[in-house]
Image (cartoon, rainbow, N blue to C red):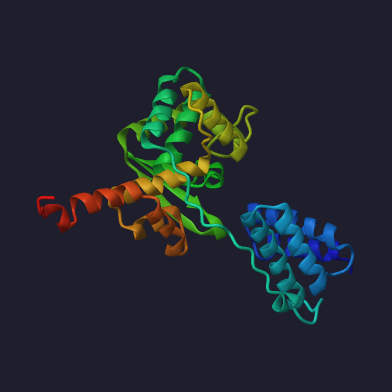
Amino acid sequence: METSNYVERYIDNCAHIKKLSPDTVKAYRIDLAQYAAFVGTGIADEQMLCKFIKHLNKKYAPRTAKRKLASVHAFYKELLLIGAIERNPFGRIPARIHIPHTLPRTIPIDTVETILSSAHSALNASNTALRDIVILELLFSTGMRVSELCCLTSETFVIENDTVRITINGKGRKQRIIQLSTPEIVATVKVYMNNCSAEIAQCGGLFFNQWGNRITPQSVRGIIRKHTGRCGIDAHITPHMFRHTFATALLDEGVDIRYIQVLLGHSSISTTQIYTHVSVGKQTMILAERHPRGKMSFGV
């Protein structure tokens, strides 16, 4: 059997037996198609895999290269499991892709306020204006991933009295629940759900695009660009930066990192701990105002 056939079989198992998320299956399909194109018809041995790893390191950024290599590594585990290979060549390859330590990029809170204020001031009879406001409010108020936002439906987004109850289907099909009770957000959501009920029903999701279909991450990025441009903001702001800003803002306000871990849906607290390196301003304030040394004076 050729490599491409094994890849198709593996992708099919990921989608229908392992029940991995559509985004994960899509990533595996892309990564393994690139692998198959590089190695040709046969299953790559150690020597060919080393060449492929060098190719990844030359062509892609470290984080992307590491992800693509992880896809191939998972594929080889499957090959060993089904008996297509007698041993996994990865066991003899010292494959290490170093990812430089980079801090999450956040948005200054006053910039977030400017964007939200601009969106609210642009509110008119247009349903897309209402949609934009709710999307921007949710990105900042919940810290959800853009993929999670695009998957929301009227079943996972429920208004209960004066609270919005959101069931988020995160990575690895892990669910978490976030409740919003901020009066302004709840009021805006109620208006949106009422005014846009037809569009919501038609697209099958909570948010619709200009063609009436379910919104995509690319559309959300376009919405952010539209509103930052309207505000005259030159900085490149992405949906994920709202997530980083959400976590950092809570940390700055003294929220326990374990609560932030739950809100973000991180399976390991080590993932959440990267935000402790971001709050330099908060750390400076604590040392300056709270440390006992600040109360000492020696007349220098």
Residue at position x 40%, y 27% from top?
Answer: 114
Which quadrant is the N terminus positioned in? bottom right
Q: Nearer the viewer, residue 37 or 197?
A: 37
Asked whether residue 8 is in view, the answer is yes
Residue 47 image-quadrant placement: bottom right
| Relative side of 192 to 214, left or right | left
Would residue 280 be found to the left or right of residue 91 on screen? left
Q: Position of residue 220 (x, y in %)?
A: 56, 35
Can you tell which quarter of the image residue 208 is in? top right
Name the image quarter holding residue 180. Answer: top left
Q: Position of residue 91 (x, y in %)?
A: 70, 78
* Observer-nearest of 175 and 107: 107
Which of these two is toward me, 278 or 180? 278
Q: Is residue 26 left or right of residue 86?
A: left
On the picture, is 275 further left or further right than 37? left
Residue placed most toward the observer, 247 or 81: 247
The picture places residue 248, in percent across and down from the top left corner, at 38, 48
Q: Is residue 94 above or below residue 216?
A: below
Task: Name the residue rendered at 56%, 42% in the picture.
Answer: 150
Q: Is residue 190 visible?
A: no
